[in-house]
Image (cartoon, rainbow, N blue to C red):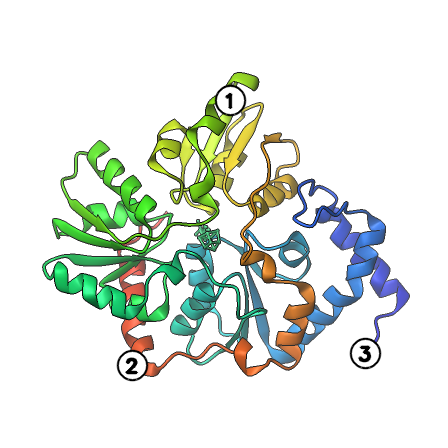
Amino acid sequence: MIATDDAVEIEAERLFGSLMHVECDPRGRTWNLDTCREIAPLTLEINRLKKEQGAVILAHSYVEPEIIYGVADFRGDSYFLSMKAKEARAKVIVFAGVVFMAETAKILSPAAKVVVPDRQSGCSLADSLNGDDLRKLKSLYPDATVVCYINSTADVKAESDVCVTSGNVYHIVEHLPAKRILFVPDRLMGQNLRDELKRRGVQKEIITSDGTCMVHDEFGPGDIALARERYPGLKVVAHPECTPEVAAASDFVGSTGAMMKYVKTTGAPYYLMLTECGLVGRLQVESPEKAFIGGCRLCPYMKLNSLEKIRDALKSPRPDQIITIPEEIRLKAARCIERMFELAPTD
Ligand code: 13P
Ligand code: SF4
């Protein structure tokens, strides 16, 4: 079905209402009514296909703004989206994010067909460790409680006792009875966890594997010092995948959801966001009065998502776009994620 000119015009205006605020577009586009008119037929088609198929689209805040504001039903951080995946009664879940997020959705909603726009959308953290690697590590530390960051594969989750996200890692590990924790796969988050537990007066030994996020490990404390000199009153907001030096020099450290909340509820003249640029785009739309400084860092995996690929994954998904997980692994991984829901703070 071809959309009428009127329908396209209404859709373009709806898109423009949000996208007009995006200044740091990952492809350098300027959003005006004409660029919105160009994508409007596609967002209309996707939203129609969604209804016909009983599908929902979950989008991480790092994907491109036309996905977030054009077709997503839910947008947010890993924790929020895993909750939505668990609650979804949808026949089809399209996950615009990266593969480990879609795997998490399949683990929590096994009856749904879960599809990804691009199977190559990996993650430098999730891809740093597999189930065999973790089994070997576990044999070296048999008394440790194994905590996996959600940025991990289904087989790593299946080998772990409890999963955490950037928003609940400190709280959950603090309250675990074990003194020795094997934390995988993020070495830098593990170091930040060690520092935060020390600050809270909690004694635990944190052993980590060696993965890092290729986006967040690039920020350095030098960037912060320079920016503070140039922009008095600046607030620096970082993700816990950054180095401990960056975390220590920042005003706030938290998940992408918590970073957004911090910016929305503080009144600084400028913000430096030490995370993927998509989050700045979201804040420009949702808090257009705030000023952001600093350049853009992009996650190449998140940027593999596109409206065209979402449309194709909905219309007739290729086998590589459909997430499948052996039931034995899914059941074990589900236990590890459910444990997170039990232990996570409720606010
Ligand atoms: P959040 O859960 O904080 O959104 O983090 C996901 C991620 O991949 C950060 O790089
Ligand atoms: Fe993985 Fe880093 Fe990309 Fe997040 S930003 S998906 S942690 S590579």
Could you tell me the amino acid type at mark 1? Leu
Question: Is residue 232 visible in the rendered structure shown here?
Answer: no
Dots 3, 1 in contact, CB < 8 A? no
Instruction: Indicate which label's residue lies in the foreground, 2 or 3.
Output: 2
Q: Identify the disc placed on residue 226.
A: 1
Could you tell me the amino acid type at mark 2? Glu
Residue 303: % across, % down = 59, 57
Seen at 16% across and 39% down, the residue is 202
Seen at 64% across and 82% down, the residue is 316
Spatial distance from mark 1 to mark 2, Cα to Cα? 51 Å
Could you tell me the amino acid type at mark 3? Met
Q: Identify the disc placed on residue 337.
A: none
Confirm or reject: label 3 Cβ below 8 Å from ligand 2. no
Instruction: Indicate which label's residue lies in the foreground, 3 or 1.
Output: 1
Seen at 38% across and 50% down, the residue is 212
Residue 77: % across, % down = 47, 53
Query: 10 Å neighbourhood of mark 2: few (<14), some, or many (≥20)?
Result: few
Lower position in the chain sequence, tag 1 or tag 2: 1
What SS does tag 3 mark?
Answer: loop
- The residue labelled by disc 2 is 328
Vertical position of residue 42 compared to residue 297: above or below: below
Residue 198: % across, % down = 20, 35
The answer to whether residue 201 is left or right of residue 248 is left
Lower position in the chain sequence, tag 3 or tag 1: 3
- The residue labelled by disc 3 is 1
